[in-house]
Image (cartoon, coloured by chain):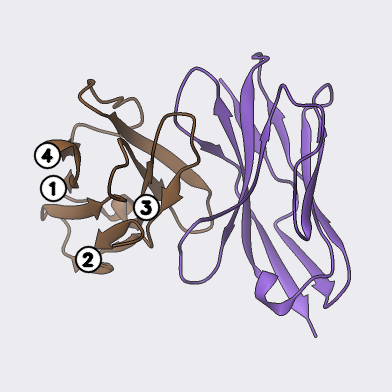
């Protein structure tokens, strides 16, 4: 069975600085998708970024980028120029190519200080 | 509406009662998912509907949990004889196709007294 591990329960960063959130996963599959979701206090899960495992190029969405290391089964999220609105819970998630359910890590709470 | 809509937003009920949680997916989305988020935890998959196919119920924790999706749109998650460990936020998501990202609602916070 696949598992997702987020080893940082909490992280903090100063506004305008850069922070990296860690995620590792375990799978025997070669085709899959990886995601980072943001969950503000409103509870809604917001998709931040998505990576297909077959793509070697790291995904980027504006200030958000990932470092995808397939051999190491690592999928970290880098937030550049952090903003106060980035404060939230961040969840890493795995989706097999063959099934549709998402498997989530336990999350990292990010605090952003002015 | 533009997004996934869930109701009620909050539900408080007594142990042993039955509850129904509703999810209205994004119009045109064929896939619908239910997840449970216990306090301080990540999301746990419960059930998945895709079109007219038989649902994937592999995540339902017990036979007290059931879900249906009527007309390929609105879904209802039912918990019978609620227990305190059922207290959690129940999140619904929908996607246009299996390979498209899931869009989540705001969830229903269920509290069992």
Q: Which residue lies furthest to the right in this view?
A: A17
Which residue bears the numbered disc 2? Answer: B8
Q: Chain A is drawn in which colour?
A: purple
Tell whether label 2 touches label 1 (CB within 8 Å).
no
1 and 4 marks on the same chain: yes
Which residue bears the numbered disc 4? Answer: B70
Q: Which of marks 3 and 1 is nearer the N terminus?
A: 1
Q: Where is residue A112 in the image (x, y as percent from the top left)?
A: 75, 75
Q: What element does badge 3 sit on?
A: strand
For the C terminus of chain B, the image quarter is bottom left
C-alpha gap between disc 1 and disc 4: 23 Å
Task: Count neighbours of disc 1 (C-alpha within 10 A) and say few if under 14, some if 14 to 19, many if 20 or more.
Answer: some
Question: In this figure, what is the number of numbered marks?
Answer: 4
4 and 2 marks on the same chain: yes
Viewer-proximal residue among B111 and A61: A61
Q: Which residue lies furthest to the front in this view?
A: B28
Vertical order, B93 against A53 (above or below): below
Front of the two marks 4 and 2: 4
Chain under numbered label 1: B
Q: Residue at x 61, y 43 (%)?
A: A105
C-alpha gap between disc 4 and disc 2: 18 Å
Front of the two marks 1 and 4: 4
Chain under numbered label 2: B
Chain under numbered label 4: B
Which residue bears the numbered disc 3? Answer: B91
């Amino acid at each position: 069975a696949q598992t997702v591990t987020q080893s940082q329960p909490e992280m903090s960063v100063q506004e305008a600085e850069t922070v990296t959130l860690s995620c590792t996963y375990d799978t025997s599959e070669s085709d899959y998708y990886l995601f980072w979701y943001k969950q503000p206090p409103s509870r809604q899960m917001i998709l931040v970024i998505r990576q297909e495992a077959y793509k070697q190029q790291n995904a980027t969405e504006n200030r958000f980028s990932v470092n995808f290391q397939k051999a190491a089964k690592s999928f970290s999220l880098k937030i550049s120029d952090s903003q106060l609105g980035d404060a939230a819970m961040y969840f890493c998630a795995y989706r097999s190519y063959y099934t549709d359910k998402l498997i989530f890590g336990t999350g990292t709470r990010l605090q952003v200080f002015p | 509406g533009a997004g996934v809509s869930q109701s009620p937003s909050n539900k408080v009920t007594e142990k042993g009662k039955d509850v129904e949680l509703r999810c209205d997916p994004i119009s045109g989305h064929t896939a619908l998912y239910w997840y449970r988020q216990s306090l301080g935890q990540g999301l746990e998959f419960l059930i998945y509907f895709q079109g007219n196919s038989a649902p994937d119920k592999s995540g339902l924790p017990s036979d007290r949990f059931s879900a249906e999706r009527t007309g390929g749109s609105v879904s209802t998650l039912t918990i019978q004889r609620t227990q305190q460990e059922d207290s959690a936020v129940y999140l619904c998501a929908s996607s246009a196709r299996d390979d498209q990202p899931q869009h989540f609602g705001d969830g229903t916070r269920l509290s069992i007294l």
